[in-house]
Amino acid sequence: MVAVMSVKEQLRTDLTTAMKARDELTSSTLRMVLTAITNEEVAGKQARELSDDEVLKVLAREGKKRRESIEAYTSAGREELAERERAEAAVIDKYLPAQMDDAELAGLVTAAIAESGADGPKAMGQVMKVLTPRIAGRADGSRVAAEVRRQLG
């Protein structure tokens, strides 16, 4: 039987490999991500080990920060900084589940609307409650919300 590595163990193993290969970009990005995971683990009243799902949420949040920074740097004309953020985002994306395409997202939203019996924009919360666990890191929250709004019209 093959032991399956947790996401966190995989990140640590890849960090060691990147350090040995003197890959500065990958090792600094993975250090940053592991620090964010550790901070999440010690936040709150009691330290705890994060599950793989929680680790993926931290990774998704870090990826989102990179995408926001890319936009900010690009609009400010700081292309060299935007390029660094793009490279970091590419490293983080390797650990995230594949993002769903627009057609798959639209289908899930349609099903969630039917299931929750929602009608009109005021019912957005009901739809999101049904939808969020099904999407779990495979689509950005703002993309999901935009599609729900569009379909609720």
Image (cartoon, rainbow, N blue to C red):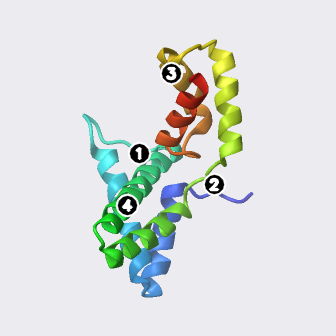
Quarter residue 74 falls in = bottom left
Image height of 22 relative to 12, above or below: below
Q: Looking at the image, which is closer to me, 26 or 45?
A: 26
Q: Are marks 2 and 1 in contact (CB under 8 Å)?
A: no
Whole-number angstrom distance, CA of label 2 to CA of label 3: 25 Å
| Mark 3, secondary structure of its residue | helix
What amino acid type should be assigned to the residue bearing mark 2? Ala
Image height of 103 relative to 45, above or below: below
What residue appears at the point 46 percent right and 51 percent down from the top-left corner? 60
On screen, residue 81 versus residue 123, left or right, reads left
Whole-number angstrom distance, CA of label 3 to CA of label 1: 33 Å
Q: Residue 129: x percent and y percent?
A: 53, 23
Mark before the other along the chain sequence, 3 or 1: 1
Location of mark 1 (residue): 49
Location of the C terminus (image quadrant): top right
Location of mark 2 (residue): 98
What amino acid type should be assigned to the residue bearing mark 3? Met
What residue appears at the point 42 percent right and 81 percent down from the top-left corner? 19
Location of mark 3 (residue): 124
Q: Residue 142: x percent and y percent?
A: 47, 40
